[in-house]
Each structure stands twice: as structure tokens, then as C-alpha cells.
Image (cartoon, rainbow, N blue to C red):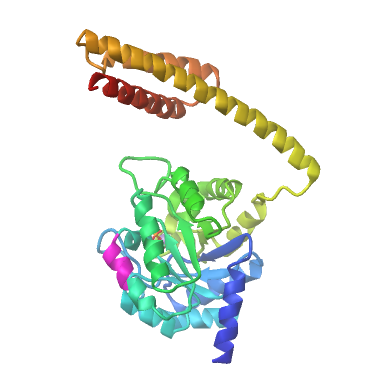
Amino acid sequence: MEQAIETKKGVEALLQKRPLIISGPCSAETEEQVVQTATRLAATGKVDILRAGIWKPRTRPGSFEGIGTKGLPWLQQAKKESGLPVAVEVATAKQVEDALHFGVDVLWIGARTTVNPFSVQDVADALKGADVPVLIKNPINPDLELWIGAVERVANAGIKNIGLIHRGFSSYGNTEYRNAPMWHLAIEMKRRNPGMLLINDPSHICGRRDILLDVAQKAIDLDFDGLIIESHIDPDNAWSDAKQQVTPERLGEMISSIVWRTEEIDSEELHAVMEKMRQQINQLDDELLQLIGQRMKVADKIGQYKKDNNITILQTNRWNAILERAYERGDKLGLSQEFITKYFDAVHMESINHQNKIMNS
Ligand code: PEP
Ligand code: MN
């Protein structure tokens, strides 16, 4: 019992480590596979916690749905041989009970569970009274409130140590990613939960090995606290998520090649240089706001004119012309089409709202 308490403290402290690196197979398949992955990961010296899926929620039946409870003793063995604490995904009350019974150190709630408040509540109820850290993946659909709701449910169950995993969001249609990162949602989640552990899961974002490192570096550049990356001793023959897994040795190389950055600005000189550029940015932002304010005043005027002459607010040809013009100019200024579209959509909507108010006053 005393030893169990010691480990608990150890894991709490470990979760404070920056960068925090979690790695291991998508799924536990055999005892040998789990133990070998764990010892080879530990040998890289880069990994803090071992992950392995025991119960696998699959989008469609027929693929490997996890080895189940019989894999939990394998994790105990892997921990014993590698010294790495273990993390497992839980989606039901029974899975929470089993995982805690077998001494799993860290639990995580998967993206297909976070979407369902009933499931999250079921897991949260089973967690009552347990002293275990819980990591919560973003829901598979891009809905920040669902992610926040899951955090609240787990916190209300009395869990003190909660962390976040950004694993990307499903979207219809093909992109280079399996699940689009939609970084702005992770950034907003971080803003709303300052100080809460936030790690990135490039494996499920990318769905393929070749771009894992790019996404991982991007996360670190955005001040994420760490990474969870899938690793398998024989990636091509993994029973799940074969395309995105890497060997433990490759994982070690990847972690070594990441440029680690810090949010802290410790030297006076760095501080002064940054401060100067930030003042320029603030100045420009003020000017932009002034200009947008002026633009909306013109929108008010044109709204009045349209009202007096019974002309519709939306003029599709005019809107197309505005966009075409902006793409051309934006391109010369090094602004992406994606940005121009978002920016003009926002400005156009604000302008429509202004005109709407005038027309209906
Ligand atoms: C996983 O981590 O293997 C997994 C199933 O992740 P997600 O819930 O993010 O799809
Ligand atoms: Mn996986």
C-alpha cells in the first residue's frame, strides 16, 4: 500500500515534467509486444509514460476492438520491466474499475467518448473517490463546449489532476490529415484553462508517419506541454493504426530532433527586443481597429441608402468582386487565401449586421 502511495506521488510529479512525453502502442496486442515496446521506449531515455489501448472504440465493427481486461496484467509487467508508469483509455464505468484494480497510473478519455455526455458522466461517476490523473482528449467533432463539459464532469467527480490532449477533429472530405488539427480550438482551450496540462497527439492528427514531426514541432512552437505519440515494435503489422506508428527507436530520434521552446523570456535583452516589436504590433492592431470602425460607418451610410431606395443588403456580384480583389492584393502581400476568406467573411458579416440594424430601425 505504501509503495502504491509512493507511485502516486511519483506520477503526480512526473506529470509536471516539461516536455512530458507519452508513448506506446495504439493497442496492446500480446504481452511480449507490450513489454518489448515499453523496454525499448524506456531505453531511449526520452519517454515518461507508457500508453497502450486495452479497449479500442472503432468507428466501424470488424476491426480489432482491443484485447480487453486480460491485457491489464501485461501493462503491470511492462511497468515492472521498464519502470514507466502506464496510461490507458477508459470509456465505461467497468473499464475504470478494471483499470484502477490493476493499478493503471493515468487514465485517458478518448475522442469518441468525449462527444457523449452520458458516457463521460458514467466514467466520471466511476472515478468518484479515485486518486488518479485523467487526461481528456478533445471530442472528435470540433465542439469546444463538449470538451469543456467533459473536463467539468471529471472535475465535479473530485479528480484533481486533469490534463488535456489535443488529437484533432474529424472533418468531411480529404485533407492531408486524418483529423484536422484546428489549432485555434486548442489555443482557445488553453486560454480557457490556464495552467492545465495540454499535450498534443500528432499520431491521430496525421494518421501517417511522414508528417508526425511537423505537427509535433508545431505544437511545441505553440507552447504545448508535451506529446503523446504511438509507437510499436513492428509498426506495419500493428493491429490498429498501423500507418501512423513508429518504432521506439524512431520515436527517440524524433523527440531528439524537436526544437524545444519555452514561453519564458528570461534575459533583459530578449525582453526589450520582444517588447519593442509587441508595441509595434499593438500600434498596428489599434490602427486596424480604427479603420474597421470607419469602414462600418460607411456600411451604416450605405445601409441607409439601400433602405431609402429599397435595395437588398446582400449584393452577390459585389461580394464576389470584393473577394476577387482581396485575393489578388492579399497574394502580393503574402497573405493566404484562407486568411483573406476568413477575414473578409468576418468583416462582411459585421457590415451586414450593421446594415440590418439600420434597415430595421
Ligand atoms: C487512441 O489513442 O488510440 C485513440 C483511439 O485515440 P482517439 O480517442 O483520439 O481517437
Ligand atoms: Mn490509435
Ligand 1 quarter of the rendering: bottom left
Percent position of residue 283, x then y: 62, 27
Q: Is residue 19 left or right of residue 180?
A: right
* Furthest residue in direction left, as rendered: 310
Q: Residue at 32% x, 12% y: name it.
A: 302
Q: Is residue 306 left or right of residue 114?
A: left
The secondary structure making up most of the magenta span is helix
Q: Is residue 78 left or right of residue 58?
A: right
Q: Residue at 30% x, 15% y: name it.
A: 303
The quadrant in which the C terminus is found is top left
First to last magenta residue range = 116-122
Percent position of residue 14, x then y: 61, 71
Q: Residue at 31% x, 62% y: name it.
A: 58
Which residue occupies the foreground of this view, 105 or 32?
A: 105
The quadrant in which the N terminus is found is bottom right
Which residue occupies the foreground of this view, 189 or 232?
A: 189
* Furthest residue in direction top, as rendered: 309
Q: Is residue 315 left or right of residue 347?
A: left
Q: Is residue 315 magenta?
A: no
Q: Is residue 127 visible?
A: yes
Question: In the image, is residue 343 above or below residue 40?
Answer: above
In this rendering, the count of numbered labels is 0
Q: Residue at 43% x, 74% y: name it.
A: 158
Q: Is residue 207 visible?
A: no
Percent position of residue 92, x then y: 31, 73
Q: Is residue 117 magenta?
A: yes
Dividing the picture into quadrants, the one containing residue 128 is: bottom left
Percent position of residue 166, x then y: 46, 54
Dividing the picture into quadrants, the one containing residue 130 is: bottom left
* Furthest residue in direction front, as rendered: 361
Question: In the image, is residue 276 above or below residue 307?
Answer: below
